Image: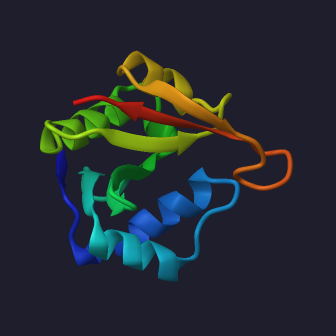
Amino acid sequence: MIREYASQDFWDVSFLNQISYLNPEPDDVLRVKVSTGNVWVLCDGQVFGSIIVCPDLDKLWIWSLTVARSYWNLGWGNRLMQTAEDFYKDQVLWLHTSPTGPANHLYTKRGYRTSQYLKDFYGKGMDAVEMYKLA
């Protein structure tokens, strides 16, 4: 089930962010993001996925999309993306991702286009692509 984030979900969302990213943001940054953005979680007794969308510099950014590995390839990431896109149906959504990461295919399949290539965006030797989807 996908539902809106609630404060009691914080530690599950934090754990997912810690295990999903090479350089995860600290909890204090995550707290700001969940308090200033819109967040949805996948829940089946416990949170096993989330999407965080935050405004920044006049753009709406998909700041984080996480799904626990045991739930990969079951369409949950796609469903979370659809939830955010439906909520922001008349706006452009932006994101950063690894050019070779597993989610890159999902974003391309959903109609996201590459805006620019960002060398060393995630640290030395860890590049990113900036992507967007028109409303």
Image coordinates of residue 105 in percent, x first then y, are 52, 21
Q: Residue at x 33, y 70 (%)?
A: 34
- Hey, which residue is sitting farthest bottom in the picture? 28
Q: Where is residue 90 in the image (x, y as percent from the top left)?
A: 14, 37
The answer to which of 92 and 88 lies nearer the viewer is 92
Figure check: 123 above or below 69: below
Tell whether 49 sits left or right of 70.
left
State the image quarter where residue 78 is shown. top left
Nearer to me, 94 or 53: 94
Front-lying residue, 56 or 16: 56
Q: Is residue 55 left or right of residue 132?
A: left
Residue placed furthest toward the right: 125
| Number of marks | 0
Query: Relative to residue 106, is residue 85 drawn left or right?
Result: left
Whether residue 50 is visible to the viewer of this picture, yes or no, is no
Residue occupying the far front of the picture:
58
Q: Which residue is drawn at 38% across and 26% down?
A: 74
Q: Residue at x 38, y 62 (%)?
A: 56
From the top left corner, tell me how far across and down residue 76 is, in percent.
Answer: 33, 34
- Percent of width and height locating residue 81: 30, 36
118 or 46, which is in the foreground? 118
